[in-house]
Every structure is written in structure tokens, then in C-alpha cells.
Amino acid sequence: MVLRTLPAIALVALFSSAQPAVVVAQQLPPGLSDPNLPPQPEAPILEPQPLPSPEELLPLPPRSDLLGPESGPESGPDISDTVVVEQFRVLGSTVFSEAELAQATAPYLNRAITFAELFEARSAITQLYVNAGYITSGAFIPTDQTISDGVVDIRVVEGTLEAIAIEGLENLNPNYVRSRVAVAAGRPLDVNRLIAGLQLLQLDPLIESLSADLAAGTQTGSSLLTLSVVEADSTRGTITIDNGRSPTVGTFRRRAQLSEGNLFGLGDRFELGYSQTDGSAAWDLSYTVPFNAYNGTIGLIYSISDSRVIDDDFEILDIESDAEAVELTLRQPVFQTPQQEVALAVTLSHDVSRSTFQLPGDERRGFPTPGADAGGEIQVTAIRFSQEWTTRQANQVIALRSQFNLGTDWFEATINDNDQPDSHFFSWQGQAQWVQLLARDTLLLARVNTQLADRPLLSLEQFRLGGSGSVRGYRQDRTTADSGLFASLEVRLPILRIPEWESLVQLTPFVDYGLAWNRGDRPSPDADELMSVGLGLLWQASDRLTARLDWGIPLINDDTDGSSLQESGILFTLSADLF
């Protein structure tokens, strides 16, 4: 997710009987932040979760039921009691190299072997397949060959999936499941890969549970796979209240979100969200559709917002803003197992922000944000290339994300001839998350976010510190800069369980730290270093209700004089799933 941050500018109004004058500096005065800034993004916590066992997903019948009995001596070629074999010629193998096949049959070469040993050589090839997970593949010695010149042919029948039958689906297109299972099974059929693919499907939010049955097909080496699938509820409606917005537009936020994870039966996800504070309102719309069986997706996000500064200290300026953002993202996992995922994504984004102000008796003017035009407008077009790596185990999750951002002049993006920031920039963002399960319901969470920029940035691209999702104990977006670092360590300790309500209460002590700095001639932020310690309570009632209360205590640069709960170091969130 792109980090978007507030402009670094100060505006001081000087009044006289004549036309009011405006003086522009490089920093906003304390307490004023850009009302156009979207909420601070916060990566979801990826908690460890156990995978279903292979036996639960795919109980395997005896191999003989899948492949049929191997050819015995009575069906072999016509040879004398012993034979000297100088070469085994293995035909039909696409999995193993000639060297691997030769190594398996080497003990039976260049010596007199019995008829039974000849079939042991064949079984050695079969066992090579079985050991690698190809349990429906096997080898046999053709009966129509005459052994001459010491050469014996061994033919391999590599197993395949003849058909995949799917039961239980009502809304999800069967091809969504079938294509992913076929990719996982591979050709020839690899049962180990098939089980891993079924485990991966079990993690899919569209699937509640599944089980599989593998049976012999109508041809030698072919198999029939029957899947019984229970779909998960893909529709979700959530309402949330919190105090995670900037005091500039009002900290108390109300949010409603409707999502459908399977809109047209393709596994396509649609989300519609609306949020509101006393000084702002925003709509968010997104649609994501998979385009291949490897979980590649194309996503489109559109958001629109308008706001006004309601802080009493700046009421005379009558600052109003509106913003639009569009993102088109192509994401493709390049390596995916139930335990690990490596994914690449390319995003084309375009953001437009307009801010104006009006002094008493004067006309409305563009707010002089660094880089903005005379009308207070900023446009940023960027190409963003991200790389993600996630590993899951029964007791821990590690997630790393890197993103390179290259600003362009496309679609009328802001380009300035002077030294003001514009849409020409390059930056890198890194995110890391480590979640360790210490005991039952006891978690250790560590997070690091960073950004490095090559030049002064427009406000929409700056790094932010303070508030929810950042250094708690300070007001939201307390500090903004071109580059920065944020680190957090938190422990979740269970203190109360109510089984009847499926309820858990956890104590969450934490420590947060942030550092920010600017590029070029732009002065350093007035509070370039933030640090806090604190204590929180997290209450989860089944899967429907979550409440959190955090109290952060600033340790440095504590100059907040506001009266809101957020500015007193207290953050709260209450979220309820209606359906």
C-alpha cells in the first residue's frame, strides 16, 4: 500500500485594512495537517494458523487400487534362467534424467541376473517415482521384446488426472477450484503437490472446508479426483468507529464497509466503503478479479474525498480540500505453497489533490502547498513495483514487502521548473512484520516500516509518523518528511477467556519509535524523532466484534496541547461484523 503523507508548508495570515497578505514557509505550524491525506495505512496482523493434515484432505487408498498390480514374472519377456544386461533403456519418463534412471538400475548391469532380478530393476524405477510423490506412475517391461545385445527396455506409464469432479459448490464457479487443483497436481500426477495445493485452497477465504477422494480411472495410470467443498460466506458488512483521524478534520471517525468476495462467481472481490468525521467524508471502491489459476489478480481502486479544517486555531482560514485517487494493480505470485508465498506486483496510480482557503472579505484562493499550482492543485502519477515474501508456520509468521516508486509526468501530473517538489521522484518503501506465537493466545508482534526518497516529495508521497498505525501517544500524522523509519514491538497477553461468548481479552504492552528526515534544502521536521511506551486492551468476541483501547505515553517531543482523546495519547477502535 502506498504511504501518503501531509504537505510541509506553513501559512500565516497578516491582517491590515488593505488586502490580506500570505506568507509561505516550509512547514505547517503544529496542529495543522493536510485534510486531503487518507487514513494512515496499517498492515493487517497475519496470525499463525495450523494447516489441515494431508490425511484429512486426501486419504489415499492402497497404491494397487490406483495403479493396478505390477507385471509379474509370468508376463515378462521370454528369457533363459539368467541374462547379462548391459543397458536398461527407460522409455516414457519425463520426470527423471537419464543419470537418475541409470543410477536406479545400476546394481543390475553387467552381471548375470535372474528373471526375478530383472523385475526388481523395473520396480526400482517404479520406486523412484513413488518416493518422489508420483504414486500413480509405474514401470513395466514390455512382453513383446526380445532381449539382444544386452539391452532391455523398461517402459514408464506416468500417472495423470483423468477428471476432477467437484461437489458442494453453489456460487463459486467450479473452474475456479478445478483449475487450481489441476495446476497443483501437475503432469504427471504428484500426490505431494496435490496435497499442498489442497492445503492452499483450504486457506482461500472463499472456501470453508474441503475433502478429496482419489480413485483409479478408466485407463492405466489415470485417476479420478472427487472434491467435496463447503463454501464460506463471501459477503461481509462491517461498521467501525475509532479516533484515528487527524485533529485537523476531526479525530472521531465512523466507517461502513460492504464487501463481496465472489461477486460474479469468479472469485472476484468487490468492496465499497464510506468514512466520515466532523470535517471529512470519503468513498472507496475497489474490484479485484483473478486472471489465472496461479492466483494472479488485476485490481482497480477508486477513492474520492472532501474535507475542511475544523481546528479552531485555523478556522479563520476556511481551508477546504478534495481529492481523487485511481490505482490499477497487476499482482502475480511467482512461488506459492501453504507455507510460503513470493509475489510481484506493478501498480499505476494517479492522485489529484486540491486545497483552497478563504480569508474574511477575500475570494477563495489555492492553498500554497509546496509544489501546488496557483489553484492549490497537486497531481501525482507513479509506477510502483512491489515484491512480497510471506512465510507461515504453526507458531510464527514473517512478512516482508518492498516497493519502488517512480514518479512520471503522465496524465497532466504536476511538473515544476523551479526547485519545488513535483511528480518526478524516486522512492523506496520497506515493510517487515514478525508474529511469534509464544503460548496459547500469547503473541509477540514486531513491525518495521521505512521510506527513502531521492529528493523532496510532494505531500501525497511523504512519510508520516504519529497516531494509529504509527507511533501511538502522539496525534495522527504528528510528523511528516521525505524519508523515515518506524518500528514497533508489542506483546499480546491473555488475561480473560469467556468460552460461552467465544470471547478473549488480551493485555497489549507496546513500545513505538519513529525517525523522520527531509531531503535537499527542506528543513528537518520540528519533531524528527518520536518514541512512546504504552498499554492496551484488546477484546475479541467470536468473529463478530473487536474492540481495542491503547494508551500511549510520549517520551520525547511531547508538545501536544489539544483536548481530544487522541492528543491525550488514547486511541480506541470498535469494529462489528453485521453479516
Image (cartoon, grey):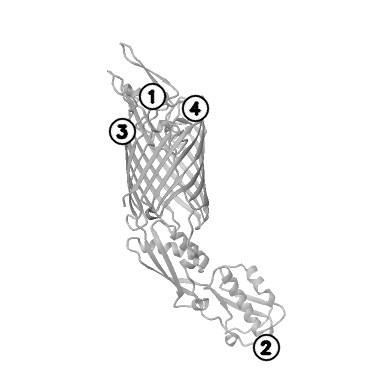
* Mark 3 closeness class: few <14, some 14–19, many ≥20 residues within 10 Å: some
- Of labels 3 and 4, earlier in sequence is 3
Mark identifier at residue 368 = 1
| Disc 3: which residue | 278
Nearer to the camera, 454 or 64:
64
For the residues labelled 3 and 4, say whether their Cβ atoms are less than 8 Å apart.
no
Which kind of residue does numbered mark 2 sit on?
Answer: Asp
Q: Position of residue 108 (x, y in %)?
A: 68, 78
Mark identifier at residue 81 = 2
Report the residue that reaches farthest toward the top. Answer: 17
For the residues labelled 1 and 2, say whether their Cβ atoms are less than 8 Å apart.
no
Report the residue that reaches farthest toward the left. Answer: 361
**Which marked residue is nearer to the observer: mark 1 or mark 2?**
1
| Disc 4: which residue | 557
**Residue 306 falls left or right of residue 158:** left
Which kind of residue does numbered mark 3 sit on?
Answer: Asp
Which kind of residue does numbered mark 4 sit on?
Answer: Asn
Alpha-carbon span between mark 1 and mark 2: 98 Å
Alpha-carbon span between mark 2 and mark 3: 95 Å
Nearer to the camera, 314 or 463:
314
Alpha-carbon span between mark 1 and mark 4: 27 Å
